[in-house]
Image (cartoon, helix red, strand yellow):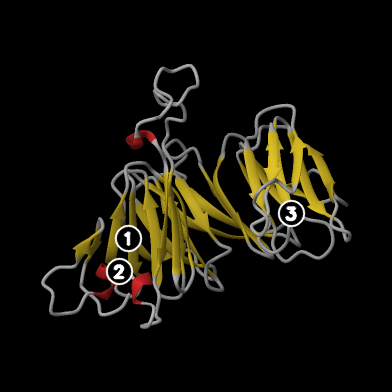
Amino acid sequence: GTISVWSLMFGREPIHRYQHNQRIQALALGSDRATVATASGFEVKVESPNDRGFWQTTGTFEIQKLVNFLNLVPDVMGSPVTVAAAEDIVYLLKAEDPGKILHSVYGQPVTCLDVSAHEVAFGVKTFGWLLNEPNQILLYNLETSQCLKKMGNSIGDFTCVNLQNSPPNMLVTGNKDRRVRVFDLRKSESLCSLYAHQLGVSAVQMDDWKIVSGGEEGLVCVWDQRMGTKLWEMYARHPVRHVWFNSHSLITANIPDEKTPRGASITDDDLTAHRKHRGIIYAYEFSVDQLAVESVLPICRSSYDEVTGYNYNIGLAVPYDNV
C-alpha cells in the first residue's frame, strides 16, 4: 500500500511517499501538473504539492465499490478532479462535491475509461444477447454530467479507449472482438474498423493519420488510418498494456499476466526469473535529423531498392526511405 513519487530530474530518492492500508488497485498521474491519485479498498486519495512545494493530501474520497479504473482530469484550475470507475458506477470526484455519481447502471460494469479536459469516455458491458443490447462506448460531459453520445455496436467487450490523446472530436477504441475502431464524436457509427489482433486489443492511440495498437498476443502494430493498412509491427512475448507516441517517439510496455513466475520469489533457489517471464519496455526513436544517423535503426532507413524491410524483429509492410 505504499506510494513513492519520483522526480525525473532527481531520481536517487523519492520526492514523496504516502501510505494506504490495503494494496493499490488503481493509480493515475496528472499529465499537466504534479498530481497523483490512488485507489485502495474503498478509498481514493489525491496528493499534490502546494505553492511552496510541500506535498499534501488534497482529497480523500470514500466510495461504495472497489475501483477498477482511475483518471485525473487534465487542465483543471484549482483542486484536482478525478474520475473513478468502480464496477458498474462512474464517480466524478471533486473536493467541493465528493462522491458524485456520473453514471450507474446495475449489472453493466465499466470495461475501460479515459478522460479529456471536458469529457469522459468509457466502455460498458451490457446484458448482450439477453436483451439484444450490444456493448457500447458512452461519452459524458464533465461539466453538465450529461450523456452526450452512445457509440459502438459490438458483441465483444471494449477493452481500451483513448480520448485524451486523440484529435478533436475523435476517439479510438480496442475490443475483445480483435478490432480497433475509430469514432467521430459527432456520429454514432465508427469511421473505420481494423482487424488488428488475434487475442483482442489491449492498448491503442491515434493521431491525424496513424493508429498504434497493442494486443494480448504481444504484437504492436502501426496502421495508416486513411488506407486501412498496416505499416509495421513489432512482437514481444507478453500482452501489450501501454502504448504512447508523439511525432518522433514511441513507447510500448509488454506486461506478463503472471506476476509471480517461478524464480521471481525471494524464497526460490534461483532468484533470477527467466527472461521469458519478464515484462519489457521498448522505446523507439523515429528521428528526422539526417545528421543523427546513429539514432535511427537501420530498418528505418530502408530504401526502395531493398526487396524486404525486416530487422530487429520489426517487419515493415513496405520499405520506406524514412519512417
Q: Amino acid at mark 2?
A: Gly
SS at mark 3? Answer: loop
Q: Which mark is residue 194?
A: 1
Q: Which residue is mark 2?
A: 228
Numbered disc in front, either 1 or 3: 3
State if disc 2 and disc 1 touch (CB < 8 Å). yes
Estimate the spatial distance between the alpha carbons at disc 2 and disc 3, rounded to whole Å.
38 Å
Residue drawn where x is 39% and y is 45% of the image = 176
Q: Amino acid at mark 1?
A: Leu
Q: Is residue 168 left or right of residue 12?
A: left
SS at mark 1? Answer: strand
Where does the image place residue 167, in percent across and percent down from the top left? Answer: 53, 72
- Viewport quadrant of the C terminus: bottom left
Estimate the spatial distance between the alpha carbons at disc 1 and disc 2, rounded to whole Å.
7 Å
Give neighbour class at mark 1: few <14, some 14-19, many 20+ (Cα, 10 Å): some
Where does the image place residue 270, in percent across and percent down from the top left? Answer: 39, 22
Q: Which residue is mark 3?
A: 35
Identify the image quadrant of residue 190: bottom left
Give neighbour class at mark 2: few <14, some 14-19, many 20+ (Cα, 10 Å): some
SS at mark 2? Answer: loop
Residue drawn where x is 75% and y is 41% of the image = 17
